[in-house]
């Protein structure tokens, strides 16, 4: 498992250009790491419930954890009680519920490399997003956007670290 092209675990800003983030994700996949992309447009399979979407995700990534255990763990991290919308299809959810479902999906997967689209202008990460990021400590969290406090730029030109191909 060669991870030489990847930053070490932690929080890194990779700039607004998707090219570097996509190259880092490709390097992570070649290294056999679980990857994910968190963005406002991350979709679900429309004819499946949220729970069925989560089960499909676990099967696709060959995760051994049982769905009920993964969902319970993720709900605890997000500070949510089991919502009624888990059995609904994505189109039936409000924007806020879809956003919670996207965060839940990331916590169920527990990616080792996560690309995160920067928050809207002038807005930091909200409480749920902060809980997600804290729960994924030990992963490589790559911010697609300008550096934020506690999110240094990767690669740091002063470090001599290799850029992604």
Image (tube, rainbow, N blue to C red):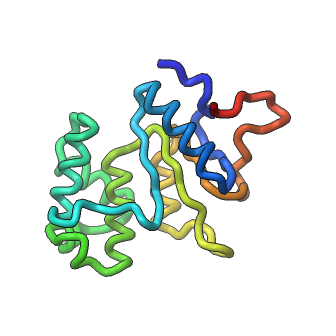
Residue 126 position (above or below residue 2): below
Q: Position of residue 153 (x, y in %)?
A: 73, 46
Q: Nearer the viewer, residue 58 or 72?
A: 58
Residue at horizontal 17%, vertical 43%?
66
Residue 25 position (above or below residue 68): above
Residue at horizontal 45%, vertical 26%?
30
Residue 47 position (above or below residue 165): below
Query: Is 44 positioned to the left or the right of 128 in the image?
Result: left
Query: Is 89 positioned to the left or the right of 29 in the image?
Result: left
Q: Position of residue 114 (x, y in %)?
A: 49, 46
Residue at horizontal 62%, vertical 69%?
124
Q: Position of residue 160 (x, y in %)?
A: 80, 28
Q: Name, please, the residue furthest toward the right.
A: 158
Residue 34 occupies quadrant: top left
Q: Name, please, the residue furthest toward the top.
A: 1
Q: Quadrant of the C terminus?
A: top right
Query: Is 89 positioned to the left or the right of 94 in the image?
Result: left
Query: Is 82 positioned to the left or the right of 135 in the image?
Result: left
Residue 109 position (above or below residue 80): above
Residue 22 occupies quadrant: top right
Q: Nearer the viewer, residue 107 or 18?
A: 18
Q: How many marks?
A: 0
Q: Position of residue 11 (x, y in %)?
A: 62, 46
Residue at horizontal 56%, vertical 38%?
23
């Amino acid at each position: 498992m060669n991870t030489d092209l990847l930053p070490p675990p932690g929080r890194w800003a990779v700039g607004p250009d998707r090219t570097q983030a996509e190259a880092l994700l490709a390097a992570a996949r070649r290294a056999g790491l679980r990857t994910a992309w968190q963005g406002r447009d991350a979709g679900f399979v429309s004819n499946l419930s949220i729970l069925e979407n989560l089960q499909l995700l676990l099967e696709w990534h060959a995760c051994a954890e049982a769905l009920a255990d993964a969902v319970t763990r993720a709900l605890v991290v997000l500070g949510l009680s089991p919502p009624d919308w888990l059995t609904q299809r994505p189109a039936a959810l409000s924007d806020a519920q879809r956003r919670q479902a996207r965060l839940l999906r990331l916590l169920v997967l527990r990616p080792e490399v996560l690309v995160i689209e920067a928050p809207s202008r002038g807005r930091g990460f909200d409480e749920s997003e902060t809980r997600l990021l804290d729960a994924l400590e030990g992963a490589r969290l790559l911010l697609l956007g300008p550096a934020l406090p506690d999110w240094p730029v990767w690669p740091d030109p002063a470090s001599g670290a290799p850029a992604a191909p």
